[in-house]
Amino acid sequence: EGDHSARSRDHDESRYGEGTNGNDYEDGNEEEDNVQMLPSTDRSDKSQKLATKASTGLPQLETNALEKVILKIRNLLQQGFGVHGAQIINSQMSGGDGELNIMRPGIKVDCAFGVCQIKSFNTITDTLQEDITVYVNRVVNLIHSCVETWEGAATQNQGSTYMFVWRMPDSHDNDSNFSQSITTNEQKTVIVDRALVASLKLIAESRRAMELKDFQKKINSKSKKKKESADVDLGIALHFGWGIEGSIGSDLKIDALYLSPHQKVAETVESLTEDYDVPLLLTDTIYRHLSLKAKNNCRKIDVINFEEIESAVGIYTFDLKAGIPSAPSYHNLGELIKLPELDTVNVSKFKNKGIDYMYTIDQDIAGLQASYSPEFLEKFRSGIIPYLSGDWKKADEIFCELLDDHPEDGPSAFLSNFMSMYDLCAPPEWSGKRDLL
């Protein structure tokens, strides 16, 4: 009897495959057998239902789960590198094998470099302690939102300092923001106008951000006990130049960066915002490419030698007044807020011609522009000319007159103090440009 059972089992395995028996086959194919017994039309409907049942089984669920995991990994990588950084990393993986090769040469591109620094950062950190990360992340959200809104890209940070760029498209790029007929100089104008508008919107957003105001009150209340001032404040600088775009690091860690002496120039110019007591500075490399409407609000305040690029650079400021610009509570960070009297203007008509319309119809930019009279600006220019030519006594006399009427003007105060360090006598080697202090 045992031999008979074994022979029967062997027969089943040879017919239906190892590890199965006739019952298994019959159970697993009962529905299929029933289909064969149905009329042809019913048989077709039944087969379709079976196919649908098989296609929605466990393998499909596993595929969906895998897709979700891949999307999460992609989003995390994009958050880590940024959208633009992810593109740089992707360009280093173009060999076809999916391997990252960081030993490839970088790409030389022209960029508008931006730098933003949180002022009084050490005092703020000492005051907020563990809450400093919350504060910084809220500030960074403002920075990234304004920069991304105006087509820029955040690149890196160094403690309290944050870098971002507006990259000029090269011949291989397919930038939908530029028409085929636009010239290189016109592209530069659009790029630097975006950088300036993003910076102005960032200043406006930071001034009215209630979550930062709450921190400011806490910081100022504690700093008074230490006899210090620690206003929540941002300093911003813009500079245009070339940079080498690429991935820097090792098998342990990689960053997508721009390596350039012009990046260092932008950082140095930002540090000068405290000297001139202004929130925003830009170099002549930015100024010369700005649209006319933007230039009309800029003021040349100095010329400085930069060892990094072995060249002298003119320094400009975009005159801003104090105060908090109003905005609707529902607006998106960094986006256009029309002046009420211009609410019916159709902005889409101007977008293909640049963004200089922002200096006219945006409520933030119009509200931030300092209302210096033409007489004041002309008198300041009449003081800059003798300052650069070396007639410091005449220049100081003009700046002191300006300070009598406008004691808040930081550039006039700084230049007067700088010349006083030399007893109002320009050094013999003076050539209309100064070295950094």
Image (cartoon, rainbow, N blue to C red):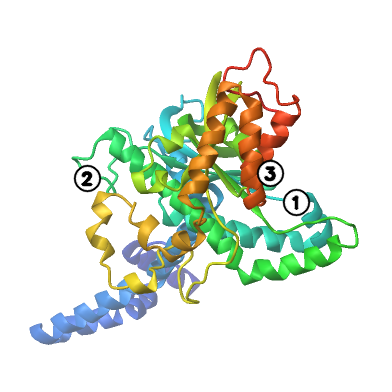
In this figure, which residue is indicated by the disc labeled 1? 120
Residue displayed at 63% across by 39% down:
399
In this figure, which residue is indicated by the disc labeled 3? 274
Give how far across and how far down residue 88 sits, in percent.
45, 39
- Alpha-carbon neighbours of circle 2 within 10 Å: few (<14), some, or many (≥20)? few
Secondary structure category for the residue under label 1: loop
Residue 183: which quarter of the image?
Answer: top left
Secondary structure category for the residue under label 3: helix
Give how far across and how far down residue 98 sits, in percent.
42, 38
Identity, as a three-letter code, of the amino acid under mark 2: Ser
Identity, as a three-letter code, of the amino acid under mark 1: Ser
Mark 3 / mark 2, whichever is N-terminal = 2
Q: Is residue 312 above or below residue 409?
A: above
Mark 2 / mark 1, whichever is N-terminal = 1
Residue displayed at 55% across by 63% down:
205
Work out which residue is located at the far left of the displayed protein and give it.
40
Q: Is residue 248 visible?
A: no
In this figure, which residue is indicated by the disc labeled 2? 179
For the residue pair 158 and 81, the one nearer the viewer reads as 158
Comparing marks 3 and 2, which lies closer to the viewer?
Answer: 3
